[in-house]
């Protein structure tokens, strides 16, 4: 429990320490914005050239964007380096020649960020409001404006305002630097006569009259030149038109001549082409008739002669095809009979029973088939009381088969029953062996 309490207290102490450190850093660290200058005053500061100052400066333009204030020994103030717009108005300003004018201008002034010049601004404007700085800059610029206007004629002030602005900027820059200020731009808005004076208006009317006079002279010169050019162009156009018409007539005559020659040549070529076309048509017709006759002969040859020959050959091959199975069948039967004969001769007396045994299946199938063809209607059996009627009726079917075999022996001389009996008789088998 004591260890847990110690850990908790240590954590709380560390947390309070971190918060206190953050609060101290926040209270004594100052961050400089890009458009301002921080002045830490209260301690001596030695510059690189050995100069001793009672303050130090921090500006984002010099690469240092923040600084720490030494507690109880330093104080920090900010100087705004943003541009200030100053309206400069000069009334009843004398020009060279004794003419008085009213001049209105706009100047953009700021506290300089150069270390050499900004020290002047720190010494003069540190802790002051921007309006006080604007008032000082305005009074300074108005004084220089009157001085520059006094050195120029009204015509120079009114006509070459760019030169006027550059000259004023050049002359006012030195005094502004002494104040720690920098003049960015200076623009003349208007230059006019004072009330009751019309010097610039008269200059304007005179200039307008000269411009109108020059324009009228130029217009007259242009009209005269245009009239002369028009007359000259008309003369040249008449000559050119006459020459063009003459050239057109010549070309037209040449064209008619060439057209007549071409028409004659075309007519001659057309007649020759027509004659050649008729000759070619006659030749083509003759060749076509010859081709038609040859085609007709070949068609008859193909339809009659070739067809007849093809039918004859087909019948010949068909007869051969029909005769070939019969011939081959006869050859096969003769061969098989010859083989049977040879086997019969080699077997001797035992050949007949063997042949009968081989053919017994066919013979019996025919005999049984004949028996099956017998159809018996209703049979009434009268038994003597000993149950012999039904067996006797059933035994009539084998008896029928035996009767058919005896008839076969009488008609053909083939004794199937006797042959089978001799074959199965043991004594007979012994004699054959």
Image (cartoon, rainbow, N blue to C red):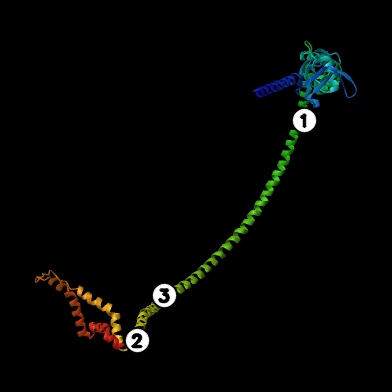
Q: Is residue 226 above or below residue 302?
A: above
Q: Residue furthest right?
A: 50
Residue 221: numbered disc: 1
- In the rendered image, residue 183, in percent from the top left (x then y), is placed at 81, 21
Q: Nearer the viewer, mark 2 or mark 3?
A: 2
Residue 373 as seen in the image, left or right of residue 359: left
Q: Is residue 427 visible?
A: yes
Residue in view at x 85 percent, y 13 percent = 98
| Foreground of the two, 1 or 14 | 1
Residue 20 as seen in the image, left or right of residue 265: right
Dot 3 falls on a residue whose secondary structure is helix
- In the rendered image, residue 321, in percent from the top left (x then y), is placed at 38, 78
Disc 3/disc 1 C-alpha distance (Å):
106 Å
Q: Nearer the viewer, mark 3 or mark 1?
A: 3
Disc 2/disc 3 C-alpha distance (Å):
63 Å
Residue in view at x 46 percent, y 74 percent = 294
Between discs 2 and 3, the one toward the N terminus: 3
Residue in view at x 43 percent, y 73 percent = 299
Contact (CB < 8 A) between labels 3 and 1?
no
Between discs 3 and 1, the one toward the N terminus: 1
Dot 1 falls on a residue whose secondary structure is helix
Dot 2 falls on a residue whose secondary structure is helix
Mark 3 burial class by Cα count in 10 Å: few <14, some 14-19, many 20+: few
Q: Is residue 156 visible?
A: no
* Quarter that holds the N terminus: top right
Residue 300: numbered disc: 3
Number of numbered discs: 3
Residue 343: numbered disc: 2
Q: Is residue 162 above or below residue 397?
A: above
């Amino acid at each position: 429990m004591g260890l847990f309490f110690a850990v908790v207290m240590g954590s709380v102490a560390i947390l309070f320490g971190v918060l206190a450190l953050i609060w101290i850093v926040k209270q004594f660290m100052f961050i400089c914005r890009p458009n301002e200058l921080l002045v830490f005053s209260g301690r001596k500061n030695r510059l690189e050239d050995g100069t001793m100052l009672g303050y130090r400066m921090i500006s984002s333009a010099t690469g240092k964007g923040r600084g720490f204030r030494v507690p109880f020994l330093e104080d920090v103030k900010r100087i705004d380096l943003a541009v200030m717009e100053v309206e400069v108005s000069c009334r009843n300003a004398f020009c060279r020649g004794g003419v008085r004018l009213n001049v209105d201008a706009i100047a953009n002034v700021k506290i300089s960020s150069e270390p050499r010049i900004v020290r002047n601004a720190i010494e003069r404007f540190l802790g002051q409001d921007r309006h006080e700085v604007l008032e000082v800059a305005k009074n300074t610029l108005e004084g220089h404006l009157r001085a520059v206007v006094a050195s120029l004629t009204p015509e120079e002030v009114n006509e070459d305002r760019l030169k006027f602005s550059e000259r004023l900027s050049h002359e006012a820059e030195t005094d502004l630097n002494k104040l720690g200020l920098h003049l960015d731009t200076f623009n003349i808005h208007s230059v006019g006569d004072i009330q009751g004076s019309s010097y610039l208006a008269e200059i304007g009317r005179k200039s307008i009259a000269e411009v109108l006079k020059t324009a009228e002279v130029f217009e007259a010169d242009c009209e005269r030149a245009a009239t002369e050019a028009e007359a000259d162009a008309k003369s040249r156009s008449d000559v050119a038109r006459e020459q063009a018409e003459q050239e057109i007539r010549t070309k037209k005559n040449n064209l008619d001549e060439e057209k007549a020659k071409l028409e004659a040549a075309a007519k001659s070529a057309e007649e020759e082409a027509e004659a050649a076309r008729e000759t070619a048509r006659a030749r083509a017709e003759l060749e076509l008739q010859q081709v038609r006759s040859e085609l007709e002969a070949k068609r008859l040859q193909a339809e009659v002669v070739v067809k007849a020959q093809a039918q004859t050959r087909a019948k010949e091959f068909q007869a051969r095809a029909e005769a070939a199975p019969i011939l081959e069948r006869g050859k096969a039967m003769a061969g098989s009979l010859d083989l049977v004969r040879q086997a019969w001769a080699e077997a001797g007396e035992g050949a007949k029973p063997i042949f009968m045994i081989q053919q017994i299946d066919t013979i019996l199938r025919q005999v049984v088939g004949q028996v099956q063809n017998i159809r018996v209607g209703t049979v009434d059996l009268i038994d003597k009381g000993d149950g012999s009627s039904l067996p006797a009726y059933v035994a009539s079917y084998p008896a029928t088969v035996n009767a058919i075999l005896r008839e076969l022996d009488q008609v053909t001389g083939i004794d199937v029953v006797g042959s089978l009996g001799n074959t199965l008789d043991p004594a007979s088998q012994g004699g054959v062996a």
